[in-house]
C-alpha cells in the first residue's frame, strides 16, 4: 500500500528511502520534499547518512528500498548519467588531464552538443563564475577556490533541474567561506535552479537555505525553514545541533510546567506530562535581582565570556526550597546570552526572566 | 511501502546488472589469464609430475612414475650415495649469499655517496647505475673474459704474486665468478636501497652520531632500521636470481663450478634428462620460496610489489 | 650533509669502476687493430665495418627487434586488459587472490624455471599444432608470457592512484561507458601503459635465458648469438656489436629518464 504521494508538478520527492551498507542501516525510511527553485540543505553530523542520501539523489547509489521522484517522474531506476541532476563533489573531482574549458565542457560534449553551442554556453558560464582567464589552466594549477568554481561551472553549464553540493565549503579557508556562501546564494537566486547542499556546519546551513532538514543516524528529524527549526525544534538533538541551548526536564501540571528551576507558564504548553523544554540563551532576559513576577529565577553568575557583540553567562540557579525528592530533575547550569549588558561580575546575583513565548516543548520523537 | 528488490547494482557511479558487469570483467581478464594459465601456471604444476617420470633411452620422457629423480637429487645415483648434488645445491646458496653480502657492503657506500651529491650530479650517478642494470647479462659477463685475460694487468698482477701461473688468465675460477656475479647484481641491490636511503631522516642520523660512540652502532641502530624496506627488496632481487644464475658461472666458471642453474640447463640440452631437470627445477623453486618467506618475515614486508 | 667522507666516495667510485671496467674494455677492444690476442695494435674501425656486413648478425638483430616489438605490443594489450579487468570489476576474494598469484609468478620465480615451464608447455602443445615448434613464434609467445605480468604490475599501480570519484563525476556528467573509457580512463592510464610497454620492450631485448630455451634454429637473437660466439671463439666484431648494444642502452636510459621527468 503506497503512502500519500503528492505528485507535485515541480520538485524532488524522496519516499521511504532506506540504505544499508552491510549490517549498518545508513538511511532509515527517509522522506523528503524539495520544492523547485529553493535552496535546500541537509544538515547533520558526520555519519548521519546525508552524503549517502545525496548520492542516491544523484544516482550514484541505489537505495535498498524506496523511490525518488523528480517532477512527478520516478527516477529511481535511472543511472546518474541519465538524470538531469549534476553534482559538485566535496573534493571537486576535476579531470586532471583536461584544462578548465574542457572540464566545464565535458557534460555538453558527452551529450554531443555542437561545437558552437558548447563554446557559447561554456563561455557564458565561465564568465558567470569569473573563470575567464583560467580557461587554459589545468587543475593542478588552480587554487582551492578556483577549483570549486570550475566544479560549479562544470555542473551548472548543463542547466540541470537540481544541483547537488557535497560539503562545498569544507575545503576552503575560513575567510573565503563567507564570500563563497554569499556567492552561492546569489547564484542560486539568479539561476532559479534547485540547490541541494549537504553540510555539517549549522551556521552555514541557516544562513544560506530556504529550507533545511536536520538528520541524525540515518533519519530525518525535522524539516523546515531555518527560523522555524531554530526557534521551534521538535527534539533535543535538533535543538542542540543548531546552536547552544538550555534543556530542562519538566513535568506538566495542567497549564503550568514544573522544572528544576521552578514553575513556568508557557505560551504553547506541551501535550505530554513528562518531557523536556528548551530555551535559547539569547531569549532569556537578565534583570535586576529585585525584579519579581512569574517565570523568574534567581541565579548567581559563575562564568562570563565577553565576545564584543554579546556577553555570555553561565549561571547557577538558586536551589528551590521544597523540592520533591521524587522529582526527576536536577537544575544544572543555565546559559544566557545578553546584548544589553556588557559587564556583570562573577558571583553577582541576577534575576532571569523566561518569556513564556520562547519556552519550547520538545517531542524527542522524530517526525 | 513495499518495493520490488531490483536486480541492479550500482558500481563506480553506474547502475547496471551484475551479470553484465561480470561478463565485461571476464572479457577483459580472460584472454590474458588463459594465456598465463596455459603457458605458465599449468606447466609449472606439471613440473611436479614430470619430476616423477623417467628418462627414456633416447632422451624422451616415459611417464612411469618413480621417486628416482628425487633420490638422485639428494645424492643417490647409480653408484650409491655421493655428495655431489649437495655440493651443487650448497654452492648455489653459498654463492648467492656471498654475492648478496658483498653487494650490500658496496651498495651502502655507493647509495650514500650518491644521495649526498647535489641534485644535478645525483641524476647523473643514478643514470650510471641504471645503465648496467639494463645491459645484457651476456655482454656484461663475457666482457670480464677480456679484462681478466692473460697478459692484461689484473692477470699479470696475480701472476706476479704467484697466485696463478705465468701467462694464464684469471678465469675460469672462483674469483672471476664472484667478480661477474657482484658486478651483475650490484645495480639490483643499489637501486632499491637508494630508494630507502633517499628517505632517510638525516636529523635522526646526526642525533645517533652524537649518541653512539662507534660507527658500527650508528649503522645498526639508526641507518639499518630506516633502510630496511629498500634493503629487503634489494636482498630478494639479488639473492633469488643469484641462486638460479647460470650465465655467469657458465662463462666465467667452467666445468668445476656448477650451480643448480647450470645443472638444470644441462638436463635440458646435453643430458636430455627432462625428468631430472624438472626435479632440479622444483628444488630451485622450493629454495626460492623458502628464501623469500624468510626475507619477508625478517623485514616485515607484506607486499613485495 | 656536507661532511666529505673520502672512504665512502672511494668505495662508491670503485663500485662504479667494477660496473664499467668490463664495458670499457669491450669498447677498447672493439677498436683494437688485432684479431686475436689482447695486445694493443692500433686504432681501427674495421671491425665495425665487418660487423655491418655480417649476415648472421643482421638476422639476429632483426629477430631481436621483431621479437621485442611484437611481444611488447601483444603483452601491453593483454597486460593492460588484465590490469583494467582486475581493478575495475568486483571479484570475490578467492578469485582475486588466484589472479594475484598467477600474475606474480613470473616476477618472483627465477627466469630459468619460467624457461623450463615454457619448454614443457611447448612440447605438449606441439602435439596439438605445429605452431609450437621452436621458432620465432615460440620466442614471441615465451616473451609475452613473462612480459604480461610486468605490464599488469605497472598499469595496476597507475590505476590505483586514480580516484573512483573521477569516474563518478564523469557519470554524473552524462558519460556513457564508452565515452568514460575513451575520454577519462584511457588518457589517465596512458602514462602507465607507456611505462609498462617500455619495461616490456627492454626486458625482451635484454632477455637471454628464456630466449635460450624457446628459440628455434633460425630464430637466433642477439644475446644468443653472442653467447654462441663465446663458445665458438670471440671475434672483435662481437666486441663491436657489444659496444653498439651498450651505446643503445645508454641512449634508451637517457631518453627514459627525460620522459619520466615529464610525467
Image (cartoon, coloured by chain):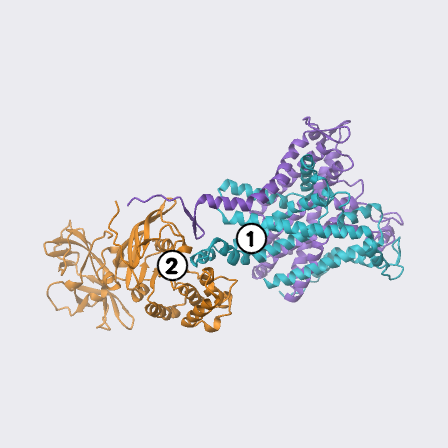
Query: Which residue is at the front of the view, B221 or A194?
Result: A194
Q: Secondary structure at mark 1?
A: helix
Mark 1 crowdedness (10 Å alpha carbons): few <14, some 14-19, many ≥20? some
Q: Which chain is orange?
A: A
User: At 62% across and 37% down in the image, what residue appears?
Assistant: B42
Give me the disc on residue C157: 1
Residue B66 in picture, x, y percent from top left: 68, 26
Which colour represents chain B?
purple
Q: Is residue A366 left or right of residue B212?
A: left
* One can see residue B213 in this view: no
Residue A367 in picture, x, y percent from top left: 24, 53
Which residue is tagged 2? Answer: A84
Q: Are marks 2 and 1 in contact (CB under 8 Å)?
A: no
Which quadrant of the rendered structure holds the N terminus of chain A? Answer: top left
User: At 69% across and 50% down in the image, what residue appears?
Assistant: C204
Q: Secondary structure at mark 2?
A: loop
Which colour represents chain C?
cyan
Tag 2 subunit:
A
Nearest-to-viewer mark from 2 and 1:
2
Give me the disc on residue B171: none
Note whether A282 is above or below B169 in the view shown: below
Query: Which residue is at the front of the view, B202 or C73?
Result: C73
Mark 2 crowdedness (10 Å alpha carbons): few <14, some 14-19, many ≥20? some
Q: Is residue B265 left or right of residue B225?
A: right
Residue B94 in picture, x, y percent from top left: 71, 42
Residue A7 is drawn in which quadrant? bottom left
User: At 78% across and 47% down in the image, what residue appears?
Assistant: C227
Disc 2 from disc 1: Cα separation:
35 Å
Note whether A158 is above or below A15 in the view shown: below
Tag 1 subunit:
C
Residue B52 in picture, x, y percent from top left: 67, 29
Q: Is residue B33 left or right of residue B130?
A: left
Amino acid at each position: 500500500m503506497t503512502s500519500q504521494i503528492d505528485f507535485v508538478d515541480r520538485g524532488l520527492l524522496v519516499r521511504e528511502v532506506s540504505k544499508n551498507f552491510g549490517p549498518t542501516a545508513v538511511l532509515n525510511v527517509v522522506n523528503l520534499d524539495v520544492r523547485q527553485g529553493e535552496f535546500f540543505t541537509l544538515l547533520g553530523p558526520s555519519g548521519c547518512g546525508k552524503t549517502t542520501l545525496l548520492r542516491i539523489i544523484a544516482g550514484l547509489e541505489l537505495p535498498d528500498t524506496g523511490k525518488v521522484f523528480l517532477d512527478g517522474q520516478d527516477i529511481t531506476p535511472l543511472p546518474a548519467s541519465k538524470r538531469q541532476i549534476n553534482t559538485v563533489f566535496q573534493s571537486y573531482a576535476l579531470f586532471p588531464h583536461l584544462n578548465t574549458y574542457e572540464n566545464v565542457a565535458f557534460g555538453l560534449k558527452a551529450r554531443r552538443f555542437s561545437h558552437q553551442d558548447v563554446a557559447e554556453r561554456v563561455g557564458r558560464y565561465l564568465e558567470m563564475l569569473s573563470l575567464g582567464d583560467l580557461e587554459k589552466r589545468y587543475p593542478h594549477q588552480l587554487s582551492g577556490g578556483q577549483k570549486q568554481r570550475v566544479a560549479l561551472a562544470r555542473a551548472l553549464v548543463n542547466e540541470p533541474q537540481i544541483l547537488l553540493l557535497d560539503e562545498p565549503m569544507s575545503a576552503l579557508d575560513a575567510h573565503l567561506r563567507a564570500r563563497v556562501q554569499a556567492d552561492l546564494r546569489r547564484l542560486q537566486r539568479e539561476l532559479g535552479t534547485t540547490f541541494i547542499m549537504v553540510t555539517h556546519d549549522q551556521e552555514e546551513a541557516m544562513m544560506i537555505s530556504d529550507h533545511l532538514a536536520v538528520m541524525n543516524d540515518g533519519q530525518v528529524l525535522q524539516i523546515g525553514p531555518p527560523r522555524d527549526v531554530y526557534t521551534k525544534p521538535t527534539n533535543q538533538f535538533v535543538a542542540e545541533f543548531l546552536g547552544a541551548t538550555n534543556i530542562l526536564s519538566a513535568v506538566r501540571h495542567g497549564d503550568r510546567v514544573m522544572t528544576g528551576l521552578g514553575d513556568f507558564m508557557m505560551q504553547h504548553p506541551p501535550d505530554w506530562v513528562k518531557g523536556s523544554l528548551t530555551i535559547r540563551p539569547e531569549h532569556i532576559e537578565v534583570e535586576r535581582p529585585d525584579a519579581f513576577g512569574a517565570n523568574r529565577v534567581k541565579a548567581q553568575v559563575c562564568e562570563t565570556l565577553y565576545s564584543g557583540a554579546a556577553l555570555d553567562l553561565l549561571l547557577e540557579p538558586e536551589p528551590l526550597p521544597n523540592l520533591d525528592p521524587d522529582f526527576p530533575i536536577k537544575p544544572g547550569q543555565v546559559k544566557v546570552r545578553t546584548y544589553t549588558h556588557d559587564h556583570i561580575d562573577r558571583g553577582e546575583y541576577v534575576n532571569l526572566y523566561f518569556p513564556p513565548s520562547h519556552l519550547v516543548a520538545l517531542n524527542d520523537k522524530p517526525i | 511501502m513495499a518495493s520490488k528488490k531490483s536486480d541492479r547494482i550500482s558500481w563506480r557511479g553506474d547502475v547496471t546488472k551484475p551479470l553484465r558487469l561480470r561478463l565485461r570483467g571476464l572479457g577483459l581478464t580472460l584472454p590474458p589469464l588463459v594465456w598465463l594459465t596455459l603457458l605458465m601456471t599449468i606447466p609449472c604444476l606439471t613440473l611436479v609430475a614430470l619430476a616423477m617420470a623417467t628418462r627414456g633411452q633416447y632422451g624422451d620422457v616415459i611417464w612411469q612414475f618413480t621417486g628416482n629423480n628425487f633420490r638422485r637429487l639428494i645424492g643417490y645415483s647409480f653408484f650409491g650415495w655421493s655428495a655431489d648434488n649437495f655440493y651443487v645445491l650448497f654452492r648455489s646458496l653459498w654463492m648467492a649469499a656471498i654475492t648478496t653480502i658483498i653487494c650490500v657492503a658496496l651498495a651502502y657506500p655507493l647509495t650514500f655517496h650518491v644521495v649526498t651529491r647535489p641534485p644535478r650530479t645525483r641524476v647523473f650517478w643514478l643514470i650510471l647505475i641504471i645503465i648496467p642494470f639494463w645491459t645484457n647479462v651476456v655482454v656484461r659477463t663475457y666482457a670480464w673474459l677480456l679484462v681478466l685475460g692473460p697478459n692484461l694487468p689484473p692477470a699479470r698482477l696475480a701472476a706476479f704474486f704467484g697466485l696463478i701461473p705465468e701467462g694464464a688468465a684469471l678465469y675460469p675460477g672462483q674469483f672471476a665468478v664472484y667478480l661477474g656475479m657482484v658486478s651483475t647484481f650490484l645495480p639490483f641491490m643499489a637501486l632499491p636501497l637508494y630508494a630507502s636511503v633517499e628517505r632517510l631522516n638525516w636529523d635522526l642520523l646526526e642525533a645517533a652520531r652524537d649518541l653512539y660512540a662507534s660507527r658500527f652502532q650508528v649503522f645498526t641502530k639508526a641507518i639499518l632500521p630506516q633502510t630496511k624496506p629498500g634493503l629487503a627488496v634489494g636482498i630478494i632481487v639479488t639473492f633469488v636470481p643469484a641462486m638460479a644464475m647460470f650465465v655467469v658461472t657458465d662463462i666465467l666458471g667452467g666445468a668445476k663450478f656448477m650451480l643448480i642453474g647450470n645443472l638444470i640447463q644441462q638436463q635440458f640440452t646435453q643430458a636430455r634428462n627432462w625428468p631430472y631437470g624438472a626435479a632440479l627445477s622444483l628444488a630451485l623453486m622450493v629454495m626460492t620460496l623458502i628464501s623469500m618467506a624468510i626475507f619477508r618475515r625478517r623485514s616485515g614486508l607484506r607486499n613485495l610489489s | 650533509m656536507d661532511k666529505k667522507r673520502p672512504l665512502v666516495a672511494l668505495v662508491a667510485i670503485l663500485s662504479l669502476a667494477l660496473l664499467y671496467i668490463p664495458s670499457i674494455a669491450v669498447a677498447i677492444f672493439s677498436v683494437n687493430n688485432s684479431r686475436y690476442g689482447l695486445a694493443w695494435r692500433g686504432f681501427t674501425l674495421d671491425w665495425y665495418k665487418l660487423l655491418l656486413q655480417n649476415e648472421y648478425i643482421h638476422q639476429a638483430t632483426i629477430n631481436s627487434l621483431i621479437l621485442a616489438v611484437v611481444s611488447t605490443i601483444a603483452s601491453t594489450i593483454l597486460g593492460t586488459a588484465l590490469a583494467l579487468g582486475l581493478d575495475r570489476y568486483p571479484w570475490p576474494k578467492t578469485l582475486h587472490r588466484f589472479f594475484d598469484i598467477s600474475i606474480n609468478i613470473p616476477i618472483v620465480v627465477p627466469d630459468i624455471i619460467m624457461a623450463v615451464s615454457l619448454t614443457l608447455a611447448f612440447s605438449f602443445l606441439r602435439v596439438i599444432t605445429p605452431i609450437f615448434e621452436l621458432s620465432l613464434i615460440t620466442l614471441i609467445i615465451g616473451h609475452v608470457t613473462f612480459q604480461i605480468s610486468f605490464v599488469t604490475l605497472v598499469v595496476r599501480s597507475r590505476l590505483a592512484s586514480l580516484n573512483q570519484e573521477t569516474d563518478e563525476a564523469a557519470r554524473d556528467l552524462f558519460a556513457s561507458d564508452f565515452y568514460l573509457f575513451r575520454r577519462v580512463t584511457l588518457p589517465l592510464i596512458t602514462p602507465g601503459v607507456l611505462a609498462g610497454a617500455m619495461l616490456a620492450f627492454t626486458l625482451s631485448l635484454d632477455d637471454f635465458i628464456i630466449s635460450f630455451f624457446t628459440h628455434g634454429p633460425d630464430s637466433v637473437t642477439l644475446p644468443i648469438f653472442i653467447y654462441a660466439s663465446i663458445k665458438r671463439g670471440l671475434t672483435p666484431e662481437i666486441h663491436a656489436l657489444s659496444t653498439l648494444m651498450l651505446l643503445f642502452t645508454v641512449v634508451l636510459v637517457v631518453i627514459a629518464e627525460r620522459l619520466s621527468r615529464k610525467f
